[in-house]
Image (spheres, rainbow, N blue to C red):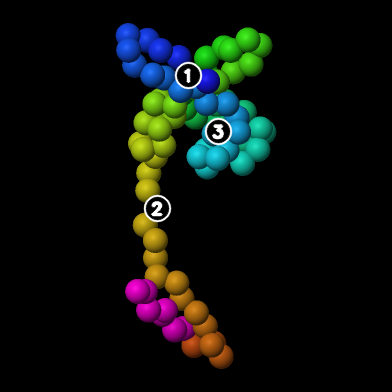
Amino acid sequence: MRLFAKGISMRILKYADLRAKGVCGSRASLHRLRDTDPTFPQGVAIGGGIGWLEAEVDGWIAARPRIEKRPQVSTINGNRLARATA
């Protein structure tokens, strides 16, 4: 669903859209996130349902801390061997 305000298109995301973006894995995890994370965007009421503005969700995702990827480590016969990364 798209709304238009002052010539700006605003897309409203539903649960399936949030899941596709990797925000939540289930409806329960979405409710837990809404209840425990004060930085999570407020929802907007849509005809008995709820949605989230895509720009706010994208901003929330961008503000999340990043986890550095560490090189994968393998063990063969108890010896640790670091894998080469290409």
Distance from disc 1 to disc 3, alpha carbons, whole Å, reads: 13 Å
Q: Residues within 10 Å of mark 3 (few under 14, many from 20)?
A: some
Magenta highlight range: 80-86
Point 37% across, 44% down: residue:
65
Residue 69 at what x, y percent from top left?
A: 39, 61
Q: Is residue 16 left or right of residue 56?
A: right
Q: Is residue 28 left or right of residue 52?
A: right
Amino acid of disc 3: Asp
Q: Is residue 32 visible?
A: no
Question: Residue 78 appears in which quarter of the rendering?
Answer: bottom right
Residue 29 at what x, y percent from top left?
A: 62, 36
Give the residue furthest to the front.
7
Point 58% across, 12% down: residue:
46
Which one is earlier in the sequence, the residue at label 3 or at label 2? Answer: 3
Distance from disc 3 to disc 2, alpha carbons, whole Å, reads: 23 Å
Please identify, in this view, whether the residue under mark 2 or under mark 1 is nearer the observer: 1
Which one is earlier in the sequence, the residue at label 2 or at label 1? Answer: 1
Q: Secondary structure at mark 3?
A: helix
Please identify, in this view, whether the residue under mark 1 or under mark 3 is nearer the observer: 1
User: Where is mark 2, residue-wise?
Assistant: 67
Q: Is residue 11 left or right of residue 78?
A: left
Quadrant (top left, top right, bottom left, bottom right) of the C terminus: bottom left
User: Where is mark 3, residue-wise?
Assistant: 17
Question: Residue 9 appears in which quarter of the rendering?
Answer: top left
Residue 25 is a magenta residue: no
